[in-house]
Image: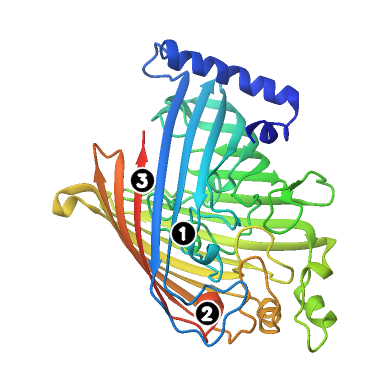
Amino acid sequence: MLIDALNNFPLSLMKRILTPIILLVSSVLFGQSDSAKDERFSVHMQTTVITQHKPYFHAKYSGINSLISQEETQTSITSTLFLGARLWQGASAYLNPEIAGGSGLSGALGVGASTNGETYRVGDPKPAISLARIFFRQQFSFGSEKEYMDADQNQLGGMRSTHFLALTVGKVSLADYFDANSFSHDPRSQFLSWGLMSNGAWDYPANVKGYTPSAILEYVTPQYELRYHTSLLPKSANSSDMNWNIAQASGQSIEYSLKPHLEKGKVILRFLAFYNTANMGSYKQSIALAADTIAPGIIQTRQYGRSKYGFAFNMEAESPNKVIGGFIRAGWNDGNNETWVFTEIDQTFSAGCILKGAKWKRKNDAFGLAWVYSGLSRAHRDYLQAGGKGFILGDGNLNYGTEFLEEVYYSFRLLKNNVAFTVAYQFVNNPGYNKDRGPVNIFSVRVHAEI
């Protein structure tokens, strides 16, 4: 399976990237770099296990893509190895083998802001090994001002210019670069819901597991950041097979981040726009072609040239003592054609905060509370009401209402902060935007370990 993944990339590029990885393995076996301030090689690992349980909830009817109303418990697991190597000045390469398995509740179906960000919409819950990321990064520095970057996953420790231009090429997760937020972005350590880990209205390019071949250009200064990517989209909605015909199918986003200077505390504002084009189906045409006795099918209306575009806003703020931080997100897409990649959300608004445990002498613990409201375009809701289904929604009918999810969690840091144990509760009203189903109560336990 690993070899199959590597075969998706040009051989010459793979040789250049894998050569330093071989050196990295040698370094791990025979000794690390002799520089404490400027890492040459990097090895990190993470494992996350999440168990979710929901009691029975009331539903007037259910469809093939519904969150099932019966009592249910599901567990997911991911384990990732993060390997990195410095090549030459400003250049580095990274490789992330990953094993993932298990399932979200009802196979991660039936909720727009799905409840476990560590799960995928795949039919087989058995753990499987894949190549999550493999990419090359070249950074060009400007000016003499530098800052020290701590060693981290896919980040080599050492001095870095505060003004730089960077080019990243390879298989990546775009969520690592865009729509970042210090308080609501990582389901392995923060909020679990898809609608809180990213902007739900941003249908960002990815395969079914969240990764895609991309080229990313970044310009970063202490006051602002500008990022752009062009990426492959899957051949069909929510699939693993990527479409290399970039003349007919691709995804692009541009994001501007502003970091105003404050005497105390921190605020970051991010503005994002995206445009995807692929072999998409039309909600309105699907309804028009369907007979009165037959539910509309989106697949029958797919054709190249259709697109989805949208906008997103993202703000985070932190107190001067770094004890409390909060966020606001808002997003919109046109919703005329089918959702292709992330989740079936056309409008979103979310807000929340995280309180660190310094007040009760547990400074590395965290308490989080957040809400997310999700909505659909008129064409999208009409399609579902007529009995149509997407890759995540489809109750067979729809009594439309805004989907609301509230999430609260407490995370205990253990074993020198390398292990976190989290308990969480989610309340979902109108799951799948349907007033005829729910509300739903979901209880979660998460264990996350990293080195």
* Residue under label 2: 402
Residue 116, disc: 1
**Pointer 3: residues within 10 angstroms few (<14), some, or many (20+)?**
many
Quarter-of-image position of residue 136: top right
Image side of residue 387 versus residue 56, left or right: right
Q: In which quarter of the image is residue 359?
A: bottom left
Of 440 and 281, nearer the camera is 440
Question: Which is nearer the eye, 265 or 428?
Answer: 428
Amino acid at dot 3: His
- In front of the other: label 1 or label 2? 1
Mark pair 1, 2: CA separation: 20 Å
Distance, label 3 to label 2, CA atoms, is 32 Å
The kind of secondary structure element at disc 3 is: strand
Query: Sequence-wise, which precedes: disc 3 or disc 1?
Result: 1
Give, as a three-letter code, the residue at label 1.
Asn
Q: Which residue is drawn at 78% across and 57% down?
A: 278
Q: Which mark is residue 448?
A: 3
Let me know if residue 368 appears in the view.
Answer: no
What amino acid is at disc 2? Thr
| Mark 2 crowdedness (10 Å alpha carbons): few <14, some 14-19, many ≥20 | some
Residue 17: % across, % down: 63, 23
Position of residue 404 measured from the top left corner of the image (x, y, whole percent): 46, 75
